[in-house]
Amino acid sequence: MAEQDGRKGILVVDFGSQYVQLIARRVRENRVRSVVESPAVSVERIKEINPRGIIFSGGPSSVYDKGAPGLDRRILDLGIPVLGICYGMQVIGKLAGGRIRKSGRREYGRAIVRFRGKDPLFTGIAPESVTWMSHRDKVETLPKGFRSIARSENTPCAAFYNPEKNVYGVQFHPEVAHTADGGKMVRNFLFNICGCKRTWTMRSFIKKKVTDIREQAGGRDVVLGLSGGVDSTVCAVLLHRALGKRLHCVFVNNGLLRRNEAERVERLFRKNIRLDLRVVDAEKRFLKALKGVEDPEKKRKIIGRTFIRVFEESAGKIKNAVFLAQGTLYPDVIESRSFFGGPSKTIKSHHNVGGLPRKMGLKLMEPLRDLFKDEVREVGRELGLAREVTDRQPFPGPGLAVRIMGEVTGERLDTLRAADWIIIDVAKKRNIYYRTWQIFGVFLPVKSVGVMGDSRTYEDTIAIRAVTSVDGMTADWARVPYDVLEEMSGRIINEVEGVNRVVFDISSKPPSTIEWE
Ligand code: XMP
């Protein structure tokens, strides 16, 4: 994937912006590789990465704040083009000897900016257009060698440029969709200013990864825990392509899965892909451990612990295994070493198998750790997987247990499975499934009175939860058309025994969460 002079891709310096991953993705959408580093990145490390260009992200600080993240000044002298966004622009301003004014008041939202079209960053864009601003401070005195190349009502310097050093700064956010010509500016930076080539494709990724995996494994065996979700599935298929019989997969059926899920996984991996799959039927064990437990956090912890035990017992039997593979993705990698990324407050205990490799004496193998979720889906398609698999909606590790309020019982699981099956079926047929982030049923042990035929009923409730989201961090309730809801509700009440009422959840995240527990 190297380009002619060995320089490749774009380095994004993360100053703590909520948009840092978006910047990295914008670059990759243009088929250029991006890597994210913290502001502590050394000049030596940058030389090692050898990027074609550097982007400084925005951030929540003010450059004169105590403890505000700064950078090694020499970065501007490496002869590598730089684009600073928002706080990133102010960092450049300060490093290069300009003055930043702390204005105290935030400028937030849309702003019309006038551009000087002659400058390479703005080639081919309208002289005036809408941008998205989100900042407090602005450049008051331009550093030596810089000139203003854009103005807004609020500032005569909405962007600056040093032609000699090839360094740019913009006060607005070109990476967000609200900036009308943002995409064009990013492309100008990548291709006209940095001279990047479009070499980051998932086909080339697969080719290189297969070689890397073989090299890392060195003829030894690898174990992978399969969940049936997109990440572990793509991980398995990629590893299988590289290792064949040296890959061993373990699938734990915890009894908390959706209808036909275990069968689907077996069919896909045993029959179609023909890899070594061990299915552990641990349904009874999980249900027993969950008996009488109502507290959501307790449920999650019990499920997590039981999973680790069952997995360990089964994977431990694979004698020659030296590696444990995991489907870790790039956002997790960025998060864990981000400048601001400390441990955040626990809202829900997620499945955490992070301690497993060491405990089992295995080495970790993470073939997807360079990819974003949409890239993983693309790798899946490139590997020949169907859309049914690559575009599946996320499903939580603790499964239906966090969609049954209160105690989890076999009977409640059956009821929820039947209702959920109908929701998914209707959503797929009515073209809702692939347009929502998640759509599913929740079992509420709330009995209410109904009438069916001539008889009184007194039965439980099913809630329909449907959300749109980009990353699961924030979400809005999906505006599912009434007639689709009507079909779901009608079928659930008619076909699922023990349910006489269906409700629709209209809460966004925050303040609610996507799953009910
Ligand atoms: P919440 O409910 O926190 O969910 O808004 C955000 C996203 O994460 C999924 N989720 C989980 N995924 N293990 C997982 O792998 C878990 O324990 C877990 N809990 C929630 C949820 O489905 C949503 O997409």
Image (spheres, helix red, strand yellow):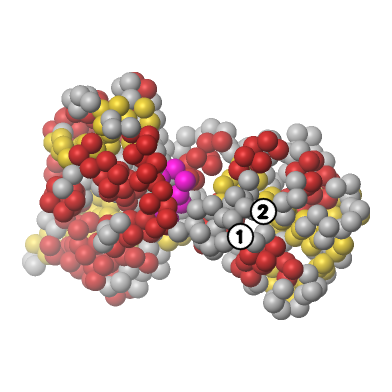
Asked if the residue under mark 1 is in contact with the one under mark 2, i.e. CB atoms within 8 Å, the reply is yes
Residue at 16% from the left image edge and 37% from the top image edge: 278
> What's the amino acid at mark 2?
Gly
Looking at the rendered structure, which numbered label has been put on residue 196? 1
Residue 197 is at least partly visible in this image: yes
Identify which residue, 244 or 265, lies in the foreground.
244
Q: Ligand 1 within 8 A of label 2's CB? A: no
Is 479 rendered above or below residue 475? below
Kindly give the residue lying farthest to the front in the view shown. Answer: 4
Quarter of the image with the C terminus in it: top left
Residue that badge 2 annotates: 53
Residue at 9% from the left image edge and 62% from the top image edge: 455
What x and y, as percent, mark residue 387?
29, 63
Res 482 quadrant in image:
bottom left
* 318 with respect to 151 (left or right): left
What is the secondary structure assignment of the residue under circle 2?
strand
Residue at 83% from the left image edge and 50% from the top image edge: 93
Gap in Å between the C-alphas at discs 2 and 1? 8 Å
Res 477 quadrant in image:
bottom left
Which label's residue is closer to the chain start, 2 or 1? 2
| Range of magenta residues | 368-377
Q: Residues within 10 Å of mark 2 (few under 14, many from 20)?
A: many
Is 365 rendered above or below residue 492? above
> What's the amino acid at mark 1?
Cys
